[in-house]
Image (cartoon, helix red, strand yellow):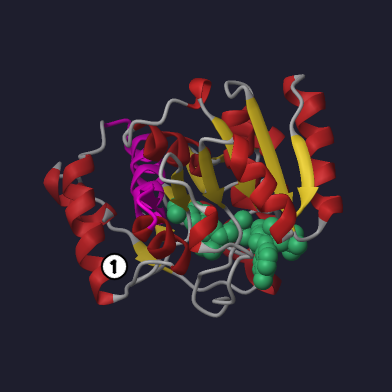
Amino acid sequence: MHNAAFRHLGLDCVYVPFKVSSRSLRDAVRGLRLLGVKGFNVTVPHKVEIVKHLQKIDPITRAIGAVNTVLNDSGTLVGYNTDATGAIEALKSNGVSPGDSKFTILGAGGAASAIIFSVAEASPRVTVLNRTLEKAEKLKRKIKRQLQVDIWTKRLTRRNLVESLRTCDVLVNATSVGMEGNPSGLPIRRADLERRLTVFDIVYGRSETELLRKARSAGCKTISGVEMLLHQGAAAFEIWTGRKAPVEVMRRALAEATARGVRGNAGC
Ligand code: NAP
């Protein structure tokens, strides 16, 4: 989608994918900087590790502790997290105002942390359910320290999930359940999902996730991970180019790529 946006704006840039092993991360980052690459995206499993190879991190990204976008500012590598912006834009463009909505968020990994940081300050209540409770509790302490707000944390069990769904407005799946290679279901049934809920699954792929299928058939409003991917990509584009991202051009390119099953992140 970035290449379509570069072409659309007549920018002389190209976005290419690289597969980098954890062992080679330091050298790869150094190489990209020395080659004068303008910027790059970083994905799993490097989002946390990359932080130690950058010279500057924007403040909210430092609090989140994970970077997905890097700008090479004349040799100074600056880290950003556009997952947070992407998630907020995906919610807002689907009529969800974080300040007026109670959230149940599943997961406490990198993407979940970005989303929780971005909604916790505005939302009247955020409940985080994670398979490993200790990780959610660690995140809760971090949020309290950085933002001076409280979130609620519980282990991800069916009982806790059903209880939390009774009082929330928006359910966000920010675990990796539903992605290729991790398809096993979340502890949730169609009957648990009331029509009034908005269900946002940040996992994306060629086909609709099981959670979104259940939510749609229960009559809930659904938001797909592709929306977040689009908006986090648009935010990265703006960081690299200083130009307004042509979101509709990117949306069309992303839809075509998703239909073909193309995935990947890269430099430009
Ligand atoms: P991560 O840091 O590895 O975190 C994974 C999370 O999923 C953890 O909370 C983990 O729980 C939980 N989990 C994994 N398998 C589980 C299972 N079988 N049952 C219950 N919980 C399980 O990964 P991430 O970077 O946050 O990414 C999470 C997902 O979001 C990925 O699918 C990624 O592709 C997607 N994503 C989408 C976008 C977008 O733009 N749409 C952006 C970023 C990420 P534990 O803590 O217990 O291990």
The quarter in which the C terminus is drawn is bottom left
Residue 36 can be seen, yes or no:
no
Q: Position of residue 207 (x, y in %)?
A: 34, 71
Q: Position of residue 180 (x, y in %)?
A: 49, 77
Determine whether, in the image, residue 9 is placed left or right of residue 233.
left
Is residue 115 or residue 126 the one in the foreground? 126
Q: Residues within 10 Å of mark 1 (few under 14, many from 20)?
A: some
**Residue occupying the point 76% across, 36% down:** 152
Find residue 196 and report its image quarter.
Answer: top left
The quarter in which the N terminus is drawn is bottom left
Magenta stretch, overall SS: helix
Is residue 45 or residue 127 the one in the foreground? 127
- Quadrant holding ligand 1? bottom right
Label 1, on which residue? 258
Determine whether, in the image, residue 61 is placed left or right of residue 261.
right
Rendered position, 199 above or below 32: above
Is residue 64 or residue 98 the one in the foreground? 98
Element under label 1?
Answer: helix
Q: Position of residue 32 (x, y in %)?
A: 50, 57
Direction front: furthest residue: 191
- Region rendered in magenta: 218-243
Look at label 1 and name its amino acid: Thr
Instruction: Tell whether position 221 is magenta.
Output: yes
Determine whether, in the image, residue 23 is placed left or right of residue 203.
right
Residue 165 can be seen, yes or no:
yes
Rendered position, 114 above or below 134: above
Q: Position of residue 147 (x, y in %)?
A: 72, 22
